[in-house]
Amino acid sequence: MPKFNDMQVFPLDGVYGQKDSPAMVVVDAGGGSLAIEADMGDGTWIAIPGSPFTEDTAFHLAIGNGRFRFTPAEGAAYSFTVR
């Protein structure tokens, strides 16, 4: 599972397909936080429920028709895996 500690947008271009499986998200807050936002398609990013995450956690994120920006702060790291 890849681990990131910098800002990433998934997918880089376009959006995930309508039938794509949920992604696995693992947050290693490490005393920092991780903001996860969804792209509205017009340059506006909206925080998903619970964001920013300040505690270690793992969850599935429904990604169909979506594009997401992950922004860690103060040493946080995360994994994002789509099958």
Image (cartoon, rainbow, N blue to C red):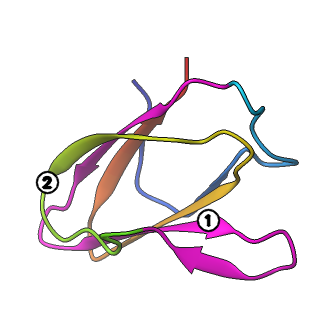
Q: Which mark is residue 67?
A: none
Residue drawn 37% across the image and 69% down it: 49
Q: Amino acid at mark 1?
A: Ala
> Is residue 36 or residue 6 the one in the foreground?
36
Determine the CA span between mark 2 and mark 1.
21 Å
Extreme residue toward the top, this view: 83
Say what secondary structure mark 2 lies in: loop
Asked if residue 65 is positioned above or below residue 74 in the image, the reply reads above
Question: Residue 19 appears at what percent x and percent y?
Answer: 70, 25
Tag on residue 38?
Answer: 1
Depth check: 25 or 30 in front? 25
| Residue 36 position in % (x across, y down) | 47, 65
Question: Which residue is the extreme one toward the bottom?
Answer: 44
Give the residues in magenta.
20-48
Q: Quadrant of residue 24?
A: top left
Between 62 and 4, which is closer to the camera in this rendering? 62
Callouts 2 and 1 close, C-beta under 8 Å: no
Amino acid marked by disc 2: Asp
Q: Earlier in the sequence, mark 2 or mark 1?
A: 1
Location of the C terminus by quadrant is top right
Which residue matches tag 2? 56
